[in-house]
Image: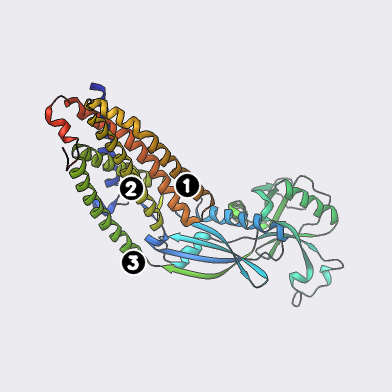
């Protein structure tokens, strides 16, 4: 019994400090005006922000390769706007069919960013890396630069930044290979598929020029001396060291596999979000008061324990939302509320089983243990099915559904632990006074003795 008391005290102490952590990291609560290290992350619908829509040009790639290319494009943009994986951004692929042709779009949502220029800056430049070969019969020395376009001179190959593995700044120390000594160059290393494509390009263009384009502009036009099988290409453009370093950084950060064109921008205000948050807070407070009143009237002392356990459950959930962090959207808050309902349901099952055991004449401690034992299968099955549902929704759902699935699944896991561990712990502490006559009355129905 002493160990149970100590454990219960430790749970209360930990809950207090976790609650203080939440309070201290929410300027809206502590009114310090300081930036919180772990603030609540609000989604676009609650915090406002910017939505950018880009159209991807898939005309130059095989139809069967479009899904992979779009996924690569999505990954690259995500790395650019969220390099550390902590900013609450959302990038989606959307295919819209128009008559007989498909149009592929990338939708980028940036919560909290309401300045469109800042939003575009977060995405940054979009370097398109391409390798092009001279068209058959073209003599560059006889072309008129005023009337000739790059499309008149070069054929596009399948080798693009999509196959880029890495880009590194180096300095040509010896002055060989057609480069000046100490000239800054960027060395590109392609993946296995890109290496094969590059080897074939160099094999087919021995003694010819292969131009390297960045954003539609040729930055290097080396002449192929031999077939290159190592998958390594050298980009030179009379760069300064800083320029070469910046180019390598941009390419490593993500050379887009497809050209993209901005087609729509939208700034979403946070006024609707503020109303939703205020309404949600009021609904939460009212719901908590009504629920607490019901628990106290119907379950008496166990009801008080349930209120304490649910409070600890809420503290743990809010702390997890901050630390993970979890983006809170309207759908995500709905997931949390539903998981709270499941936590309440678990306590109801336990208390009803407990009352049944008390009616058989068992002691309070025996009734608590037996009540939990008998309630566990129902709690386990319902919670496991809910967790499985959350996993399926997260795996197959859109970004909006995933937000719901994360808060719902996380809430179910925490609520199950709270009901089985925390509620049981405090009930066993109370059971130490089970020999007192009034104790069983405090465990009976509020309208029945």
The Cα atoms of the two marked residues, 3 and 2, are separated by: 28 Å
Mark 3 Cα shell of 10 Å, populated few (<14), some (14-19), many (≥20): few
Q: Residue at x 71, y 49 (%)?
A: 181
Q: Please name the residue that numbered disc 1 is placed on.
A: 389
Side of 162 relative to 137 (left or right)? left
Query: 351 or 24: nearer the eye?
Result: 351
Q: Secondary structure at mark 2?
A: helix
Quick one: 365 or 99, which is closer to the camera? Answer: 365
Q: Is residue 42 left or right of residue 441?
A: right
Give whichever of discs 3 and 2 has the lower sequence position.
3
Disc 3: which residue: 271
Q: Position of residue 85 (x, y in %)?
A: 49, 48
Q: Position of residue 245 (x, y in %)?
A: 60, 52
Mark closer to the observer (3, 2): 2
Q: Residue furthest front?
A: 360
User: Quick one: 156 or 295, which is closer to the camera?
Assistant: 295
Q: Is residue 183 left or right of residue 416?
A: right
SS state under label 1 = helix
Upstream in sequence: badge 1 or badge 3: 3
Q: CA distance from mark 1 to mark 3?
A: 33 Å
* Residue in the foreground of this view, choosing between 163 and 428: 428
Residue with the mark numbered 2: 341
Q: Are marks 3 and 2 in contact (CB under 8 Å)?
A: no
Q: Is residue 370 above or below residue 220?
A: above
């Amino acid at each position: 019994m002493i160990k149970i008391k100590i454990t219960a005290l430790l749970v209360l102490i930990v809950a207090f400090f976790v609650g203080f952590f939440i309070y201290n990291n929410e300027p809206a609560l502590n009114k310090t005006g300081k930036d919180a290290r772990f603030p609540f992350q609000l989604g676009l619908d609650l915090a406002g922000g910017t939505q950018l829509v880009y159209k991807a040009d898939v005309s130059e790639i095989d139809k069967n390769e479009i899904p992979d290319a779009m996924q690569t494009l999505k990954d690259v943009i995500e790395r650019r706007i969220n390099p550390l994986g902590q900013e609450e951004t959302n990038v989606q692929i959307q295919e819209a069919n128009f008559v007989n042709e498909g149009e592929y779009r990338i939708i980028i949502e940036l919560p909290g960013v309401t300045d469109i220029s800042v939003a575009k800056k977060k995405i940054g430049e979009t370097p398109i890396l391409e390798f092009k070969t001279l068209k058959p019969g073209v003599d560059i020395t006889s072309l008129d630069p005023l009337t000739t376009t790059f499309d008149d001179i070069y054929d596009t190959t399948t080798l693009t930044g999509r196959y880029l593995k890495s880009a590194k700044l180096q300095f040509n120390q010896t002055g060989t290979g057609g480069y000046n000594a100490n000239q800054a160059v960027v060395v590109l290393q392609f993946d296995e598929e890109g290496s094969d494509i590059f080897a074939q390009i160099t094999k087919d263009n021995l003694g010819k020029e292969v131009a390297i384009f960045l954003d539609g502009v040729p930055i290097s036009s080396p002449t192929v001396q031999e077939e290159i099988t190592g998958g390594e290409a050298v980009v030179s453009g009379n760069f300064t060291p800083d320029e070469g370093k910046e180019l390598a950084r941009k390419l490593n950060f993500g050379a887009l596999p497809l050209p993209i064109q901005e087609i729509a921008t939208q700034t979403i205000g946070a006024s609707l979000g503020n109303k939703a948050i205020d309404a949600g807070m009021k609904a939460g407070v009212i719901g908590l008061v009504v629920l607490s009143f019901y628990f106290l009237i119907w379950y008496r002392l166990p009801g008080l324990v349930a209120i304490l356990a649910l409070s600890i459950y809420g503290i743990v959930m809010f702390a997890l939302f901050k630390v993970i962090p979890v983006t809170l959207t309207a759908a995500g808050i709905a997931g949390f509320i539903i998981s709270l309902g499941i936590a309440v349901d678990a306590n109801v099952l336990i208390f009803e089983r407990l009352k049944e055991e008390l009616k058989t004449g068992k002691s309070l401690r025996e009734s608590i243990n037996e009540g939990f034992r008998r309630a566990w299968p129902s709690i386990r099955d319902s919670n496991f099915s809910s967790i499985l549902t959350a996993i399926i929704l997260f795996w197959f759902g859109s970004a909006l559904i995933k937000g719901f699935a994360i808060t719902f699944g996380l809430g179910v896991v925490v609520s199950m632990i709270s009901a089985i561990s925390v509620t049981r712990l405090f009930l066993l502490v109370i059971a130490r006074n089970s020999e007192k006559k009034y104790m069983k009355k405090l465990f009976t129905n509020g309208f029945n003795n």
